[in-house]
Amino acid sequence: MLLLVDNKTLRVLGRIDHSLLKKFLHDDVKIEENSDYFFIDYSTIDFNLSYTFDLFSFSDTINIGCTITISKVYDSFGNFLTEGIPQGFKTICYLTFFPKVPQSFRNLPILKGWEINNYSISLINSKDISSNEIANILEDLLILIYDDFKNISSSTVNRISKRELIKHITDKYHIRDSNEIISIMTRKGLIREDENNKIEFFRK
Amino acid sequence: MEGLPKYVFRGTTEGYNGNPSSNKNRVTSTSANPSKATLFAMVAAFRHGANGIVYIFETRSLAGIAINDGNCFSSYEEEVGFNVPPGELQKRSIGYIYVNEIRVELAKNNIIIKKSIAPELLSFELKEIDNLSGEVIEKVVDGLRNDLK
């Protein structure tokens, strides 16, 4: 899945060796359980402090169910940037995750600087994605869910209970508001709910 | 200035005195590599719709300005930071050159810079650019002297 929103994404390159961070910030570094410091690539736009992303892209997949907030920003010389990330700057950011730091962020390499690598993660705000792109994401999500059910179901692959679908979306894709996803999918004509609370998939 | 290259370069746009954060923190980034500074100028021009330019500095004429040694991490841009706002540093340059002019001069020295780059790919482009010897940089600067603004 490719998203044409690169100009509004923020690329997280990797993690920072905490001992170097102490030298860089000339201060003791306190890191909360749901936060960490990361090398962030040159930003193509300004991002205010407290700006929050609700999607992240890693290995060509979009991940949902976690919000990521820019809590602290430092330029490459260790200056704290009160305005947030300025356009054109490479930075070190303290990101705060809710509900917790996803494993893909914990798996990022520890870098010696702002180095391009194959494991970088792009942060995205769903508001910055056009409705067509949202439709594409939902459609891709539907394909994933459909494939999941094709593997576990034998005869009723095109029809499952709504409760089952909600549980599956919540458990596997960590989407807190599964009902909202289902109603968007319904509005998009990707699925239909019948009078028995069974969900029919239109994609073959 | 001891330990510094003979020249440093700053890619920006014409008439621009730097980002508010750079001015507030009184720090200006430059690059020891004119090719990389050219890429920064191209990206800045793309963003601001203005003429991309590269300032050229002889480091010996920056005496008295503290070098910022705060960056203990590596980056592709061969960054040299000075503890002075961009506008003040720019006044100490030997002049500036437009992007298209420096691209031509770099090409004469077999350093090919693309006509345009996407801002979001800046790191990828910087990574592809080789470090230049002092001799080549001197040749590039000498070739530009008559066109400096």
Image (cartoon, coloured by chain):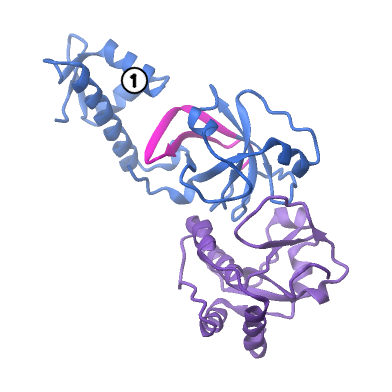
The answer to whether B49 is drawn above or below residue B135 in the figure is above
Residue A150, image x and y in percent? Answer: 19, 22
User: Which quadrant is the C terminus of chain A positioned in?
Assistant: top left
From this viewpoint, which residue is outermost toward the bottom? B146
> What is the secondary structure assignment of the residue under circle 1?
helix
Nearer the observer, B9 or A110: A110
Q: In the figure, residue B65 lies in which quadrant?
A: bottom right
Tell me the residue at 34%/45% (across/down): A2
Residue A51, image x and y in percent? Answer: 58, 37
Q: In the figure, residue A181 lies in which quadrant?
A: top left
Q: Tell me the blue chain.
A: A
Q: Give the magenta part as a residue range.
A: A48-69
Tell me the residue at 16%/28% (across/down): A202
Residue A29, image x and y in percent? Answer: 74, 32
Residue picked out by circle 1: A169
Q: Report if residue A51 lies within the magenta region.
A: yes
Tell me the residue at 63%/32% (across/down): A36
